[in-house]
Image (cartoon, rainbow, N blue to C red):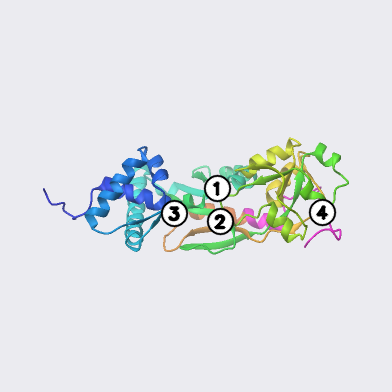
């Protein structure tokens, strides 16, 4: 057998290992690579035999990395990321005019995109690519220079900058609101609640919100959605009560598509942050976009584009 120059396992095997380690799943790696889970298992077995150590712990519910697996994955992930960045720069050419921004579907659809026209008018020569995902693992993709996250301001390997906080209150369609206009906050558990199964646990759900409001409740009734935007559409269609994030639902409230139900209002436990990678210089395009997001966030904090007719209840039922 001809000795490989770097004395490494085959690139195919390393790619299969990297995908399996990133997903912590042979099945998800197989889906990504468009092969069968059995083919992934054979490749993993081959690299473990070649290295002479196990790289994964096989669990009843999936797989986890061994110490050796963690070491190999850390090196491969970094190397593949740098290689991917070099390839993208070669394909793209002038990196100074392109930037990729990552954020959730909810933030993109209900806050960012409605404001982007101002950016395009001011900087028509720049190209912004949007990586829209509710799975924050996607935010680590090498092409992403800027992210807008909801959470508590600490993410490994990222510099963070606070943008603004938020408040949470129940919202529903106007006809549903009229039908239940006499409802109080304590009645919410008996209404059809629209639940969002956030991929990121930092976003509070109905159970946490009712708990923080000290409203007794059992198993919550209602339907479940994988996206916030879909739950809001269901609320607008008079199908139940959704959790309204003030920064995100002000426009449909102002347009009369949504109304607030009860006087319940609580501060969101986290906030919105802009982040970028530690130790990696931002491209000129990313610096321009970062400055623009700072300006937009400053206007948001001042309430400069807040609809005047959106109420902020001050009754004893409200939680500050």
In the rendered image, residue 79, in percent from the top left (x then y), is placed at: 32, 55
Within-10-Å neighbours for mark 4: few <14, some 14–19, many 20+: some
Left or right? Give the position of 181 relative to 115: right
Q: Earlier in the sequence, mark 2 or mark 3?
A: 3
Q: What distance separates the C-alpha of mark 4 from that of mark 1?
A: 31 Å
Q: Which mark is residue 291?
A: 2
Q: Is residue 120 magenta?
A: no
Assess whether mark 3 and mark 4 are in contact (beta carbons under 8 angstroms): no
Disc 4 to disc 2, C-alpha distance: 43 Å
Check contact, mark 2 vs mark 3: CB within 8 A. Answer: no
User: Quick one: label 3, few (<14), some, or many (20+) residues within 10 Å?
Assistant: some
Q: At numbered mark 2, what does the secondary structure look like: helix, strand or loop?
A: helix
Calculate the distance from the C-alpha at mark 2 to the C-alpha at mark 1.
24 Å
- From the image, state whether disc 3 or disc 1 is nearer to you: 1
In front of the other: 252 or 47: 47
Q: Which is nearer the N-term, disc 4 or disc 3? A: 4
Q: How far is the residue under mark 3 from the one under mark 1?
A: 25 Å
Secondary structure of the residue carrying tag 1 is: loop
- Residue under label 1: 134
Residue shown at 27%/59% (left/top)?
A: 53
Q: What x and y, as percent, mark residue 300?
A: 68, 54
Would you say 248 lies left or right of 22 here? Answer: right
Magenta part mainly helix, strand or loop? loop
Which secondary structure, mark 3?
Answer: loop
Would you say residue 92 is visible in this rendering? yes
């Amino acid at each position: 057998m001809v000795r490989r120059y770097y004395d490494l396992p085959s690139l195919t095997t390393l790619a299969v290992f990297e995908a399996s380690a990133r997903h912590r799943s042979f099945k998800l790696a197989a889906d990504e690579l468009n092969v069968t889970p059995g083919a992934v298992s054979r490749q993993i077995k081959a690299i473990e035999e070649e290295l002479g150590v196990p790289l994964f712990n096989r669990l009843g519910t999936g797989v986890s990395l061994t110490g050796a697996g963690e070491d190999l994955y850390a090196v491969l992930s970094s190397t593949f990321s740098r290689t991917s960045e070099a390839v993208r720069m070669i394909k793209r050419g002038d990196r100074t005019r392109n930037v990729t921004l990552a954020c959730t579907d909810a933030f993109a659809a209900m806050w960012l995109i409605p404001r982007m026209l101002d950016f395009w008018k001011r900087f028509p020569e720049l190209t912004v690519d949007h990586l829209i995902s509710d799975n924050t693992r996607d935010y680590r993709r090498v092409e992403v220079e800027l992210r807008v996250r909801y959470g508590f301001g600490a993410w490994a390997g990222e510099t963070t900058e606070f943008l603004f906080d938020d408040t949470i209150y129940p919202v529903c369609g106007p006809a549903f609101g009229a039908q239940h206009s006499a409802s109080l906050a304590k009645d919410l558990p008996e209404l059809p609640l629209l639940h969002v199964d956030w991929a990121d646990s930092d976003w509070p759900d109905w159970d946490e919100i009712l708990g923080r409001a000290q409203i007794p409740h059992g198993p919550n009734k209602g339907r479940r959605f994988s996206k916030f935007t879909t739950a809001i559409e269901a609320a607008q269609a008079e199908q139940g009560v959704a959790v309204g994030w003030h920064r995100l639902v002000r426009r449909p409230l102002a347009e009369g598509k949504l109304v607030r139900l009860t006087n319940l209002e609580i501060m969101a436990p986290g906030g919105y942050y802009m982040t970028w990678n530690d130790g990696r210089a931002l491209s000129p395009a990313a610096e321009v976009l970062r400055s623009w997001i700072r300006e937009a966030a400053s206007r948001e904090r001042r309430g400069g584009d807040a609809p005047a007719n959106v109420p902020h209840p001050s009754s004893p039922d409200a939680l500050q």
